[in-house]
Image (cartoon, grey):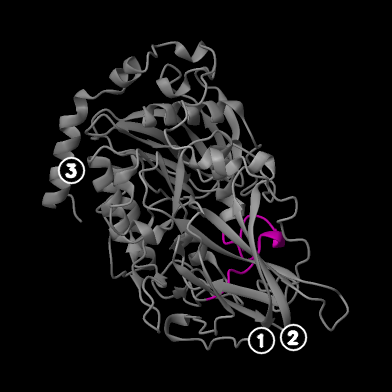
Amino acid sequence: MKDNDPSEMHRRDLLKDAAAVSLAGAAAAMGISAGAQDAPRTAPPQPSHSSLIRDENAKPGARDWQLTRVRLDKTGGMRSPPIEGYCSKQSVTAGESIEFMISTAPAQKFVIEIFRTGYYGGRGARLMTKLGPIDGQPQPLPEVGEKRLRECQWKPSTTFTIPDDWPSGVYLGRLTTESDTTGFGYWQNYVVFIVRDDRPADILLQCSDNTWQAYNQWPDGYSIYTHPKGNQGPWADVSFDRPYGKYSQIFENPQTIGSGEWLCFEFPLAYWLEKHGYDVSYCSNSDMLTPDRGLKCKAFISNGHDEYWDIRQYNSVVKMRDEGVNLLFLSGNSVCWVSPYRDSSTGAANRIIFRGGPYGGDHTWAELREQRHGPFPHRGPDEGYLMGVRNVSPVNGGGDWVCTNPDHWIFAGTGMQQGEAIPGLIGWEYHGDPPADIPGLEVVAEGTALQGGVNPQKWAATIYPGPKGNFVFNASTIWWCQDLASPPGHWLPWSHWSRPHGPDDRVQQITHNLLRKALA
């Protein structure tokens, strides 16, 4: 979509009409005035009319849900042949069935313990059910297909129907073998899936599973980034019909194998939201191809590393903003690449993606990407007019998150002063270059990120008013949720000689303030 596209012009007209809905007015409506950053810290919003998440988290958590014994195929390997698997769907609703495709080598029995991740008194997960023992067999490595596609066609090991009383959430199936013939004991791995619902929840939290799959190198160096032609072109297809291998960037953590990037970069936000009783529902990137789900919620959150969006996701979220849904991009490198879905070889919907082209419209970043790596078959609109800021080059590095607008209502109760920094919160990818012509857009934090002490790039965190009293906030960092909570099963990442420090009461308070306004 180009800048002269009629739908884009209409969208900008709506933004101009919304200029009167200033952030100062929003602050006044909240009873927050200039200088309110010195006020006492505010409590979380009053509980939603729905007690679903509070009631769920009152149930006993599991003491043992993490992976204990993991065996990779080789030093530096990505897969775990003793036991590994994948699910037939990214997300599923209560009452629907999901298939688990599991391979064990050698053939042996195994069990699947299904846990819902959440707060649960600080334990981080609850055991929902246990399946098995199940007879496991070795399943074949797929051939290398066109565009280096590795698409498994494994036989289902078991089919499971999601009970009607299972709430929306991110679920981990912990796979555990019986003692194997080598005498080394049992081995473990995860499968991951999302249970979605259709209720009018306060918050819709989108998992960044397109990005999980784009970086997934299972079985041995096959991802969007590992094509012999280079790591940035439109040359590689990747399939959800394969296990998630060990996470391949930032840190070495085999205990997250099979869980995508959920435990690495996204779980702390869900843990924190559920700890405070927020009414939250969860969805996959693939659930946002229409705006219907999001239009039932008050706030939509993009979480973690949310790089790959089908153009239909983009259009859905634009529609949600224009209809009054509040958007919180607690993420970095988001809405960066157009990633069209296509069906699997067996006809299952939305199971293959590739890097179709950059977002950016006529922006210099998109032009630069095509000059370096194109031509691409697709070009997306300028993501800055949705998020308030854009992807920039270099897009990765690290730095401190520096307050530049302390009188803004998002800082109420934090005590933050002009120039005060939250150490290491920017990374490892971020946003910058806010469009100058979004009415009411304000920069609330900004600074410089560095790649290992070199290659400086300006980043910016922004907020702007939507057309119906709503707002769009962009934290401008993948690592925002690292400073919200440190749940079991999560390690702090580091990159480019920079790292977040973990839970920080200022980040927690800013997030409470944003949600208080969004849910008012």
Q: Which residues are magenta?
A: 242-260
- Expressed as whole percent of the image width and height from the top left, the position of residue 144 reads 51, 86
What residue is pinned by disc 2? 106
| Mark 1: secondary structure | loop
Q: Are marks 2 and 1 in contact (CB under 8 Å)?
A: yes
As drawn, the residue found furthest toward the front would be 164
Front residue (pair 331, 135): 135
Name the amino acid, label 1: Pro
Q: Quadrant of residue 483?
A: top right
- Please identify the quadrant where the C terminus is shown: top left
Q: Quadrant of residue 255?
A: bottom right
Q: Which residue corresponds to the image point at 52% horizontal and 11% vertical from the top-left?
A: 38
- Expressed as whole percent of the image width and height from the top left, the position of residue 440 reads 27, 27
| Lower sequence index among marks 3 and 1 | 3
What residue is pinned by disc 1? 138
Front residue (pair 146, 468): 468
